[in-house]
Amino acid sequence: MPRRAGAAILRSRTAGPVSRRERGRRCRACPALPPPTDGARSGGRDDRLLCAERLRRARPGPRDGGRAAVRKPETVRVAAGVHLVAGSNTNWVIVREGDTVTLVDTGYPGDRELLLASLAAVGAAPEAVAAVLITHAHNDHLGSAEFLRVRYGVPVLMHEAEVPHARRDFLHQVTVGKVLANGWRPGVLPWAVHALRSGGTAKVPVAAPEAFPVAGALDLPGAPVPVHTPGHTGGHCAYLLPETGVLITGDALVSGHPTSRVRGPQLLPRMFDHDRERAVASLAVLERVDAGVLLPGHGPVHRGPVREAARCARESAG
Ligand SMILES: [Zn+2]
Ligand SMILES: [Zn+2]
C-alpha cells in the first residue's frame, strides 16, 4: 500500500500548562491514576492534574445525543513520532512519520472531536492519515473509523477475522443484560452510563473494512506488525512498532479500566471477553514479543518488558 504524500500538516501544538482551577479541583481521594499528558509533565508532576474520570465529571456532559464534551486531548509522546491519546475512556495511538500518520483505533463515536483535535495536536490533518488500524471492532475503538473512511478516504484495516465484525455481520460485545448483572461491581454502572452517552451502543459499522493486504509489517508509518491476539474478540490484533519497541495491545492486555480496581498489566474483567480462554492464551503470544513499551486500549502507558507484563497478567488471570 503506497504511503500517502503531500497531506496537509498543521502547526505542531502541545498541551498547555495545568490551570490553577484544575489543580484546585483534583480529588486526592480518587483511586484513579492521573491522566497521561505530554512528555514534559511526566515524572511526578502529573499529580497536579485531575484524574480522567474526575475531569470528565467536572465538565459539561453531552447534550447532542451522544457526543461527549470536547476537551483538550491528553497525549503522551512515548517515542519518536508515537503518541498515546487518552480518549473519554479509551486510548488510541498516532504514529507520525514525515507527512503521514498511522492511526490505531478511534475511540467512542462521541470522541470524534477529541480524535480530530489529537491529530491536530501532533501536527497532522485527517487527510494525513494513511490508514486506520483497528485492534478490534468494539464501539469504543471503532467509533470514528467509518467517518474517516467516508469523509477522507482513509482505508480501515484489521485482521481478516475481524472484518465481518466491523461490518456488524455479527456483534461480539458485552450485552446490556450482562452489564446489569454485574452492576453491583465497583465502577460498572458509572462506566455503563458513560458508554451509553458516548455511543457505546450506536450503530457505527464500517461498510468496507479491509483485511491486511500482506503478511508481516505493513507499509505504513511505524511499519506496524499485526500480532493476532484473539479472545477479547475473534480477530483482535495487537500492533508491534519494531523500530521503537512499542506494542499497542488494544483490549488484549490493558493497564487499567474504570471497572477494575487493579492497576498495572491485566486482562479486562471477564464479562468483556468473548472467549476468555483464548484471551488468556493470547497473553502467551504477547510473552514472545520483544517490546519495552506497552500502549493499552485502556489505562496508562506501561514501561518495561512487555513479556513480563503479559506474564503477570496471565498469572493473575488464574
Ligand atoms: Zn473491546
Ligand atoms: Zn475497549
Image (cartoon, rainbow, N blue to C red):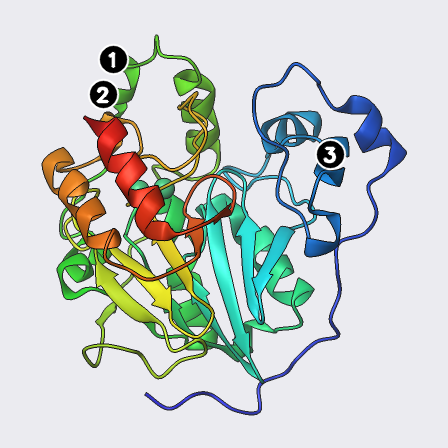
Q: Is residue 203 visible?
A: no
Looking at the rendered structure, the kind of residue marked 2 is Lys
| Left or right of 22 on screen, residue 185 | left
- Tell me the SS state at disc 3: loop
Which residue sits at x=74%, y=24%?
26
Q: Nearer the viewer, residue 159 or 42?
A: 42
Q: Position of residue 142 (x, y in %)?
A: 36, 53
Residue 59 has which mark? none
Which residue sits at x=15%, y=34%?
276
Q: Is residue 192 visible?
A: yes
Q: Nearer the viewer, residue 292 or 11?
A: 292
Where's the N terminus, which quadrant?
A: bottom left
Quarter assignment of residue 157: bottom left
Q: Position of residue 196 (x, y in %)?
A: 42, 31
Looking at the rendered structure, the kind of residue marked 1 is Ala
Q: Nearer the viewer, residue 172 or 263?
A: 263
Q: CA distance from mark 2 to mark 1?
A: 5 Å
Vertical order, 271 against 42 (above or below): above
List the residue tagged with mark 2: 178
Where's the C terminus, which quadrant?
A: top left
Vertical order, 20 against 156 (above or below): above
List the residue tagged with mark 1: 181
Q: How many marks?
A: 3
Q: CB atoms at circles 2 and 1 under 8 Å apart?
A: yes
Vertical order, 139 against 155 (above or below): above
List the residue tagged with mark 3: 49
| Chain-order first, disc 1 or disc 3 | 3
